[in-house]
Amino acid sequence: MTQIPEEAQARALRAVSDAAKKRDKIIEEAQKPVAEAAVAAVRAGASRTRIREEAGVSPRVLYGWLTTAGIPVRKKKPKAG
């Protein structure tokens, strides 16, 4: 039976998709203790900038964790211009 190139491509793309889903799950699981530690650090009074640096995350990620934990965050300033 002859293999159609599109079928091989579809199988290869499914493999990429499956691998990406596994990766995303691993990252999500690894991120949970970082988020919990970051929230605890904020509650202990640590600098949010320093927490971001230590966690290696963007402000958006940190403030997302804080919002989820019920910790107030300032609204984003509108862009000047």
Image: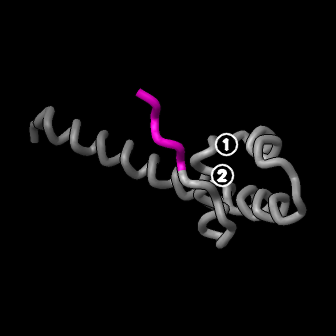
Query: In the drawing, does residue 44 fall left or right of residue 30?
Result: right
Question: Which three-letter amino acid code belongs to the residue tagged 2?
Answer: Leu
User: Which image quarter holds the C terminus?
Assistant: top left
Residue identified by numbered label 1? 57
- Asked if labels 1 and 2 touch by Cβ distance under 8 angstroms, the answer is yes
Task: Please name whichever residue, 66 or 77, is drawn nearer the observer in this view of the structure.
Answer: 77
Question: Which three-letter amino acid code belongs to the residue tagged 1?
Answer: Val
Q: How far is disc 2 from disc 1 in space, using C-alphas?
A: 7 Å
Task: Please name whichever residue, 74 or 28, is drawn nearer the observer in this view of the structure.
Answer: 74
Q: Is residue 56 above or below residue 43?
A: above
What is the secondary structure assignment of the residue under circle 1?
loop
Task: Please name whichever residue, 9 or 40, is drawn nearer the observer in this view of the structure.
Answer: 40
In magenta, the rendered stretch is 76-81
Q: Is residue 36 above or below residue 56?
A: below
Q: Residue at x 22, y 36 (%)?
A: 9
Expressed as whole percent of the image width and height from the top left, the position of residue 3 reads 14, 37
> Is residue 18 one of those drawn in magenta?
no
